[in-house]
Image: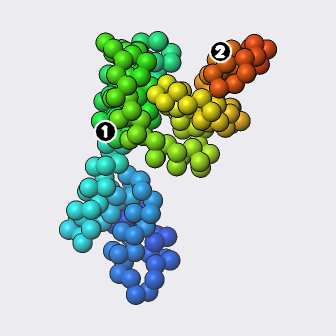
Amino acid sequence: NSSLTGDFYFKKALDTGPATTSAEQAIWQFAKEQEALPFYRAYLSKYPNGEYVAEAKARLQRALGADIAAEVVAQADYQYFELNNDKEAFLLYKQAANQGNLSAMASLAKLLASGRGTSRKDLAKAKYWAEKALPGLKELAESGHSYSQYQLGALYSNVYKNYAETNKWYSRAVDKGDAVAMLNLGVAYQYGEGLTKNYDKAMSWYLKAADE
């Protein structure tokens, strides 16, 4: 029932919208602010011929694409981290990166820089994907998103060999309990990548990672 759908999702918008704003305008503004599939669908259901239908459909398609890309990334992460299947992970990350997923762009850059999952190293392509991912990843990392902090660290390590930036972001990620960042910080201590070699600290981080 389109009326029921609209009432369910948009009661707040109708209750709080300015008196000078039409119901449709208030509802559409509210839907945009939520940035979520159910609200775009609810608007289209309530106003199938409304003023904002074209934008609603475009936003719906982008959101659907983002959801699909996120699922592909989840599959790629499983192949990479759990099954050590670099080749399959590479193909999945590439698919999601082409759909605009930041995490996939970062992971693809890392694999291209190391030559894992592909026939050869390609630093030029690695930097291309890293540059596309960096602005969005930095924004997420600065807001406290731990996996984005880990991803930034991995980019600076694998693509740019900037170990000061690498360890800065790994350190922020481990403060939030990111196990992969703990493991990589251990590697940095073991091999002296931007840090003074310290086998005791390396082992400490390896053990912490294993406990997570």
Q: Residue 51, image x and y in percent?
A: 24, 72
* Residue 200, placed above or below residue 145: above
Q: What amino acid is at disc 2?
A: Tyr
Q: Which residue is mark 2?
A: 191
208 left or right, relative to 139: right
Q: Residue 150, image x and y in percent?
A: 57, 32
Please say whether residue 67 is visible from this viewpoint: no
**Helix, strand or loop at mark 2:** helix
> Crowding near pointer 2: few (<14 within 10 Å), some, many (20+)?
some
* Residue 39, placed above or below residue 51: above
Q: Residue furthest right?
A: 200
66 left or right, relative to 103: left
Please say whether residue 24 is visible from this viewpoint: yes
The residue drawn where x is 79% and y is 14% is 200
Q: Which residue is mark 1?
A: 99
**Helix, strand or loop at mark 1:** loop
The residue drawn where x is 30% and y is 65% is 46
Task: Give the image quarter of residue 58.
Answer: bottom left
Marks 1 and 2: in contact by CB < 8 Å? no
The residue drawn where x is 39% and y is 32% is 127
Q: Residue 110, image x and y in percent?
A: 44, 25
Q: What amino acid is at disc 1?
A: Gln
* Quadrant containing the N terminus in the rendered view: bottom left
* Residue 114, placed above or below residue 103: above
In front: mark 2 or mark 1?
A: 2
> Crowding near pointer 1: few (<14 within 10 Å), some, many (20+)?
some
